[in-house]
Image (cartoon, rainbow, N blue to C red):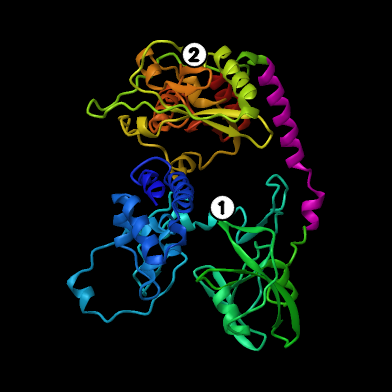
Amino acid sequence: MAMHLSLPPPEPIELSGGNISANWKKFKQKYVNYEIATGISLKDSTTRVATLLTVIGNDAIDVFNNLTWDEEDNDKKIDKCMELEKRKNKFADKKTPSANDEKRPPSKKFNCWNCGTKHGLRECPAYGKTCNYCQKRNHFQSVCRSRKKVHGLDVDQQEEEQNLNSTLFVGAVTTDIQIYNEECYVKLPVKGHITKLKIDTGSQVNIMPFKDLKKIVGSNPQINACTHNLVSYSEDKLTVLGTTKLPVKSKTDVAQELMFHIVETNQPGVLGFTSSTDLGLIKVTMAKKREEDQTKPNRGKEAKKLSEELKEEMLQKYKQVFTGLGRLEKPYHIEIYPTVTPVVNPPRTVPAALCNRVKKELDDMEKQGVVRKVEEPTDWVNSMAIVEKPNGSLRICLDPKHLNKAIKQEHFQLPTIQDITTRMANAKWFTKLDANRGYWQIPLDEESQLLTTFNTPFGRYCYQVTPFGITSAQEVFQKRMSQHLSDLEGVETDIDDIIVHAETEEKHDHHLQAVLE
C-alpha cells in the first residue's frame, strides 16, 4: 500500500488555454494508468470519483459542479465523470436563472443535438452562440454537423491508413419519419419491441444501446465478441461491447435480420445507410443531367487546363519562393511573465529502436537552421516529444506545457471564415498558397531561443525559429502574415493559408504575381 501512495498523481488538467481537447486526452491517459498502478481502479465507484475529483484540478471541479445528470446519484459514477471534457461547453455558457425562471415548473428534459447535453424546452445554452468551426449560430463546435467527416459512426480498424470512410451521397430523402433539429428518427418493431432509432446515412454500421438491448431481449443478452472500435464524427472512439443480430420490421411489415454493434450510451440507436435503404426508409435519387448541359463546351476542363498552365509558369518563374524554408525578417521576442518560476524538465527516455532516427531528424533540423545545440546553462528546459507520422517518418516537437503558462499572448484577433468569405463574395478565380511549415518562417531572437531549450539523449537543443506548440505561435504568425500582405489587393490570410482571389482571370493573375514577388 505504501508503494501505491508514493506514486504521484497526474497534474491537474488545463482547461483555461491551449488545445483543451488534447489536454483532456493526455490527462485521461495518465489518470487511467495512475488508477491501474495504484489499484484504485479496483475500488468502488465512490472512491474512484473522489480520487478523480481530488486530482483533476479547480477548472474541472467548476465544470463538474455545474453539470446536470440523467439519473439520481449519477455523479457517483466514474464513467460519467470521465466525460467532463465532452460537456465543457455547457459550463462555459451556463446562464444564471432569473426569478421568473425559478417560478416556472420544470420542463421535460431531452437530448439536445445543438449543445450535446440534456435540458428542457428553450433552455439550450447554445442558443444565440456562434459555432467556432462553421461560424453558424445556435450550436456548439463540439456537435457541429459541418465537421462530420463521417456523419455518424465509422469502423476503425487496426490500420488507420485504410480508406474505410467511403463518401456516400444521398440526393434526396423521402420518408414520413420524424425530423427534429435536422436529425431523423423512426420508431420500428425490433424483435416485437417498438424502438426509437436514428437514421444516419453517413454511418457504416447499426448501433444499439446496451440499455435498449436489455429491454428487447432481457437482462442477460447474448452478444458476440467484436474486434474493432467505432469512431464518432468528433473522432472519439467508442468501446464496442459486442455484436448481435436482431429482426427489424420495415413499414411494409417485412422483417429483416440486421447486425447491431452494442455500445454503452444514453443516445438512441442508429440505423446506418445500408440498413436504412434496405428497410425502405430512405430513397437515393440520382440527378439527371440536362441535354443542353451535355452539348455545352466543357468549361470545367478548359479552366483546369488554364489553371495547370498558370501553375507551371509560376513555379518556374518564382522557383526560389517554392524552394526550401522561408524566413521573415523581424525576429519574434517571446514575452514571459516575470512572476512565473522557470521549470527544468527531466529528460524523457527514448526507445532504443528510435534513437538513431531521432538523432538523424535532429541533425536535419540543425542543418536547416531550425534548432541549434545549447551548451550554456538555461533557466528553462522543456521536454522533447516524438511523433511518428503515418508515412513512418518522425517529427520532433517541443512539449512546452510549463512554458506556455508563462508566455504573454499577442491578443491579435484572428479572422473568421465569415470575415474572409464576405470579402471574397464576388470572386470567381482563386489560388491557395500554403506556407511551408509556417511557424518556422518566423525567427526567434537569442533570448527567446533559450526559452525553448529542450532535453534529448544527445544533449540540449533550442529552437532558432518559432516552434509548434507554444500558445502565442498562431496569433504571432497570423499577425505577421497580415502585416506583410496588408497592402495587396485580393489577398486573404488564414494562418498559414494565403488565398488569392479576383472577379476576372486577369486580375487574379496580377494579384498572384504581386504576392509571389
The boundaries of the magenta stretch are: 290-316
Instruction: Specify the quadrant of the image occupied by residue 353.
Output: top right
* Residue that numbered label 2 is attached to: 372
Query: Where residue 296 appears, x then y in whole percent?
Result: 78, 47
Instruction: Using the image, determine if residue 130 lies above or below residue 433.
Output: below
Give yes or no for residue 238 being in the magenta stretch. Answer: no
- The residue closer to the viewer here, 112 or 497, is 112
Residue 147 drawn above or below residue 329? below
Q: Is residue 45 left or right of residue 312?
A: left
Residue 206 rendering spot, x and y as whole percentages: 66, 69
Label 2 Cα neighbours within 10 Å, binned few <14 / some 14-19 / many ≥20:
some
Q: Which of the labelled discs sits on residue 373, or is there none?
A: none
Question: What residue do we see at 61% from left, 24% from top?
Answer: 355
Horizontal relation, residue 327 to residue 250: left or right = left
Q: Residue at the location (36% across, 33% down)? A: 402
* Of pointers 1 and 2, the one earlier in the residue sequence: 1
Residue 235 is tagged as 1
> Residue 211: in sight, yes or no?
yes
* Contact? badges 1 and 2 (CB < 8 Å): no
Q: Residue 390 at what x, y percent from top left?
A: 66, 37
Instruction: Determine whether the residue tagged by mark 1 lies in a helix, strand or loop.
Output: loop
- 314 magenta-colored: yes
Give, as a three-letter code, the residue at label 2: Arg
**Helix, strand or loop: magenta stretch:** helix
- Distance between mark 1 and mark 2 Cα atoms: 37 Å
Residue at 38% across / 12% down in the picture? 446
The label nearer to you, 1 versus 2, is: 2
Find the residue positioned furthest to the front. Answer: 2
